[in-house]
Amino acid sequence: MPDHPQIPTATFHPMLRLWCRIQSRIATGERGQTTAEYALVVLGAATVAMLLIAWATDTGKVATLLNKVVTSVSDRIA
């Protein structure tokens, strides 16, 4: 009996469910399909990152964030 409570898979984020499926297939020897699913997870993550970067660049949030970080760091140094 496991020491931790089981969490219903319906509450998992879809990417986490896919990751769990990948890990179970590695354990059962379905490596070819696991590689394809891993590639899809990486592709999905890269797509989300690109969309986030595009949004942040268009709205000027990146420059604002960097200015705040530089100001915070320089205030702590001085």
Image (spheres, helix red, strand yellow):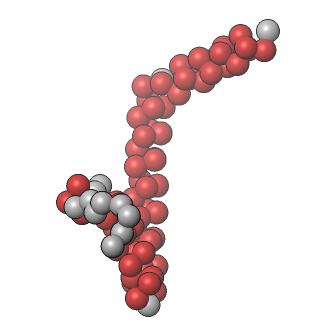
Question: Of 55 and 30, which appears nearest the observer?
Answer: 30
State whether residue 58 is above or below residue 34: above
Q: Is residue 69 above or below residue 46?
A: above
Q: Position of residue 77 (x, y in %)?
A: 78, 14
- Residue 56 visible at all: yes
Asked if residue 38 lies left or right of residue 11, the reply is right
Q: Nearer the viewer, residue 65 or 14?
A: 14
- Give the residue at x 44% y 90%: 29
Q: Position of residue 57 (x, y in %)?
A: 48, 31
Instruction: Indicate left or right for 15 with 78 as reference.
Output: left
Q: Is residue 14 left or right of residue 74?
A: left
Specify whether residue 14 is in view. no
Residue drawn at (43%, 55%), measured in percent from left and top?
A: 45
Q: How many marks?
A: 0
Quadrant location of the C terminus in the rendered image: top right
With respect to residue 49, does 72 lie above or below? above
Left or right of 76 in this view: 43: left
Q: Quadrant of the N terminus?
A: bottom left
The residue lying at 73 percent from left, 14 percent from top is: 76
Q: Quadrant of residue 21?
A: bottom left
- State the residue lying farthest toward the bottom: 29
- Which residue is located at x 40 percent, y 75 percent? 22
Depicted 7 relative to depicted 26: above or below: above
Residue 35 placement (x, y as % from top left): 46, 79
Residue 18: x, y in percent?
34, 67
